[in-house]
Amino acid sequence: KRETPLLDQLESGPWPSFVSDIKRAAEARHKNERNVEYQIPVDVCDDLLGVLELSYQDGTTHWKHGGIVGVFGYGGGVIGRYCDQPENFPGVAHFHTMRVNQPSGKYYTSQYLNDLCDLWDFRGSGLTNMHGATGDIVFIGTTTEQLEEIFFELTHKFDQDLGGSGSNLRTPATCLGQSRCEFACYDTQALCTHLTHEYQDELHRPAFPYKFKFKFDGCPNGCVASIARSDLSFIGTWRDEIRIDQEAVAAYVGGEIQPNAGAFAGRDWGPFDIQKEVIDLCPSQCMSLEDGKLVIDNKECTRCMHCINVMPRALKIGNDRGCSMLCGAKSPILDGAQMGSLLVPFIKVEDNYDEIQEIIENIWDWWMEEGKNRERLGELIKRQGFQKLLEVTNIKAVPQHIQEPRSNPYILWREEEVEGGWDRDINEFRKHH
Ligand code: SRM
Ligand code: SF4
């Protein structure tokens, strides 16, 4: 057993510690109560702790980049990792990570989880990350020889595929949507599953300038935070009116129904004040109480979800539902972090997803043609302009595309698009219109 004084300190804080977890895994591996015929060194977890301790001592990583590893026919799904001190830490000389495509909405049977863990105890370190930040089941640490074996078992016995890594479509991620959530404006799981199957090639064979992520939120609550971390984000919305049950509104106001404290976890509500907690907090100030009835000016509503979150029994999403598509979110490498920009304000999400796929493919054609190596979609949009994106997707400019009307018009008109051209006399023009 290795001494790890620096790592031990990490266990002393108030939070659950990954160091304790790895120690527990190391111990279990040595005990081997289920007589697993380990296919990688039994002290993989001890060596992992050892090399991590050394990194803390030296103030630098002892993992080195390099050496592409993977499975036959795929270009993604496996991240190669080698230790730069293989003599001292033979258990982690190779320590590759495998990303496994999680089921939509992350539903499992216990049997299935057990089988996954058994496979990984047998052929890997036993350490997992459920789930990685993109959403995958992440298997942490195995040797090169095991990769094909694991892949074979996953695809043949588990009916399960690898996820994305590298310059390809990354594993799409979705909220659990209509399977449990009354706010879901479209079937997020169905769309996620459909596009995952449809774009298998793009997921497994890196042919893009860089990574590309899809994420699906059933409503603007954004439980998978698609607006911040996907190149193409699908956010459920509706275009008719919020449905109001006035009796339930009165019951909230009268204290017979408690507001949904989950919307403000841990907060002591006291008597519910609808003016203060809902009406005054509406970002577009489109609500009022008239003779005890709640009135919403729906054309001003921005679908922020606040009122619905607080009073879910009184207010419900509209009936004419679909999603908005936003594009270009990314984290800071190369050209700075960006949130998604609205591209399609509303699109129906029906059984046939042709219209959605047409938009996706037009974007990809443009990005693959024009994108520089390691340039995310968001950066290409910044470099060539949002207008160019509208041209390649054949989407007409609408006011929602413009961030700050008048001070920052995103859209530039060509002379032939403007009645009277550049030489028109504005005053003449005004007189006639
Ligand atoms: Fe990431 C690079 C791990 C989710 C933005 N990310 C890396 C590298 C390859 C860096 C490295 O070489 O050490 C890491 C590989 C570690 C390994 O050995 O597996 C790495 N990223 C991860 C994971 C494994 C962290 C985790 O444990 O959760 C996540 C993937 C697990 C999964 O598939 O579920 C992971 N990375 C993300 C996310 C979150 C998301 O997808 O929602 C982001 C922000 C969203 C985005 O895409 O911008 C993210 N990772 C990056 C970036 C910055 C890209 C940019 O354009 O700004 C890099 C740097 C790069 O690509 O060179 C990066
Ligand atoms: Fe429900 Fe909306 Fe969260 Fe999806 S994003 S789980 S629909 S609240």
Image: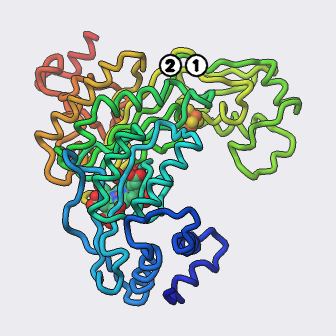
Residue 50 - label? none
Residue 53 locus on image (x, y percent): 45, 84
Q: Is residue 49 left or right of residue 430?
A: right
Q: What's the CA distance linking mark 1 and mark 2? A: 7 Å
- Asked whether 94 or 57 is in front, the reply is 94
Q: Which residue position holds label 1? A: 318
Q: Position of residue 49 (x, y in %)?
A: 46, 79
Q: Residue furthest top?
A: 432
Position of residue 128 measured from the top left corner of the image (x, y, whole percent): 47, 59
Asked whether the viewer can see residue 270, the reply is yes
- CB of mark 1 within 8 Å of CB of mark 2? yes
Dividing the picture into quarters, in which one does residue 227 lie? top left
Image side of residue 330 versus residue 242, left or right: left
Question: In terms of secondary structure, where does tag 2 sit?
Answer: strand
Task: Name the kind of residue labelled 2 in the image.
Answer: Arg
What percent of the width, then of the height, locates residue 298? 57, 21
How crowded pointer 2 is (Cα within 10 Å; few <14, some 14-19, many 20+) is rated as: some
Instruction: Classify mark 1: residues with Cα within 10 Å, few (<14), some (14-19) or many (20+).
Output: some
The residue nearer to you, when weighing 125 against 149, is 149
Q: Is residue 202 above or below residue 99?
A: above
The relative height of residue 20 versus residue 364 in the rendered view (above or below) is: below
Q: Quadrant of the C terminus?
A: top left
Q: Check disc 1 and report its element: helix, strand or loop.
A: loop
The structure residue drawn at horizontal position 75% and vertical position 52%, both measured from the top left corner, is 266
Whether residue 404 is visible, yes or no, is no
The residue at 64%/80% (across/down) is: 12
Q: Residue 164 versus residue 427: which sits nearer the camera?
A: 164
Residue denoted by label 2: 321
Q: Residue at x 42, y 49 (%)?
A: 136
- Residue at horizontal 17%, vertical 48%? 209
Position of residue 121 relative to residue 59, above or below, is above
Tell me the kind of residue under disc 1: Gly
